[in-house]
Image: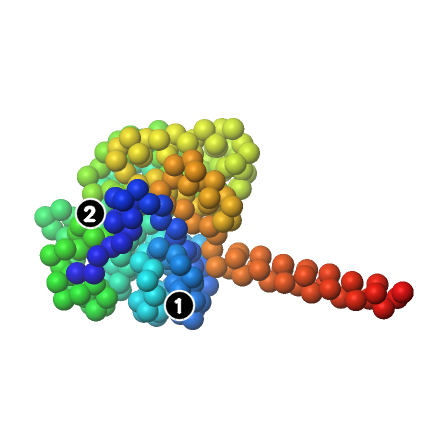
Amino acid sequence: MRQNTIRQKIAAGQPVINGWLAIPSSYSAEVIGHQGFDSVTVDLQHGMIGIDAALPMFQALSSTPAIPLARVPWNDPAQIMRLLDSGAYGIICPMISTVDDAASLVSSCRYPPHGQRSFGPARAMLYGGADYYPHADKEILVLGMIETQAGLDNLDQILAIEGLDGIYIGPNDLALALGSTPKSESDDPVVMKAVEHIRTRALAHGKIAGIFCSSGEAAAMRIKQGFQMVTPGNEAALMATAAKAAVATARGAQAYGASKTGY
């Protein structure tokens, strides 16, 4: 079976830089996958992506070095299993707030006797290899998102669930749950304390500590703080930022040319 290089990088103490896709486009997926990301997540929760669009995006990512992941809309076994069968090499699941939530997530990603994943790895075998089944449980990555007060309260019990590989922090929902506002994870002391608490407890349990970030600079800061997996924004935000900068540069040249002409 094709190895999950995310696991190798984490074991070697190297940070994983994760791309994020919100636009339902195989072309965008292919472009992003060739930009040096270690993994790329197809976002079916807040991205404008459904299962029919996700499949060709996974196929496009197959032509790149990036490991394909999926963020599911909810902790739904049917959706999780379908995305794994489509070739996702890992699942990021929102709103993991209880031990039962975490146990259900893990069970959906593991074959019996370790879980309840139904057998039918259709495209997963094309991507992972003919020997997918006997090795899938140890290669597929399972990450639960902590983004509620209940998730914080139950954090250590959640982290103790066998088969849960790590935590991916949803900073905006976490901020809302703590009475703050989105994008306040770097300036609200309460949210900052919660983020650091999640990171330290994840590492104490030997689990991956990951977080979504607003930019490359924010991602670099999180790596310095000790996060092992970071996402420097999604492709829609990166495209908008680059486009806005290009327009501003062009406008600046226009203004410069006008002033020069005036003299």
Crowding near the residue tagged with mark 2, few <14, some 14–19, many ≥20 C-alpha atoms within 10 Å: many
Secondary structure under tag 1 reads helix
Crowding near the residue tagged with mark 1, few <14, some 14–19, many ≥20 C-alpha atoms within 10 Å: many
Image spot of residue 103 (x, y percent): 23, 41
Q: Residue at x 21, y 57 (%)?
A: 3
Can see residue 173?
A: no
Secondary structure under tag 2 reads helix
Q: Amino acid at mark 1?
A: Glu
Report the front residue among 13 and 111.
13
Can see residue 54?
A: yes
Q: Residue at x 41, y 31 (%)?
A: 196
Q: Amino acid at mark 2?
A: Ser
Q: Residue at x 39, y 52 (%)?
A: 18
Quadrant in which residue 95 is drawn? top left
Mark 1 or 2: the one toward you: 1
Image spot of residue 258 (x, y percent): 82, 66
Figure quadrant of the C terminus: bottom right
Residue 239's place in the image compared with 154, above or below, is below
Quadrant in which residue 144 is drawn? top left
Report, in whole angstroms, how far the alpha carbon at label 1 lies from the one at label 2: 31 Å
Q: Which badge, 1 or 2, is on the more N-terminal residue?
A: 1
Q: Which residue is mark 2?
A: 107
Q: Residue at x 42, y 41 (%)?
A: 223
Report the front residue among 97 and 121.
121
Q: Disc number at residue 30?
A: 1
Report the front residue among 229 and 106.
229
Quadrant in which residue 1 is drawn? bottom left
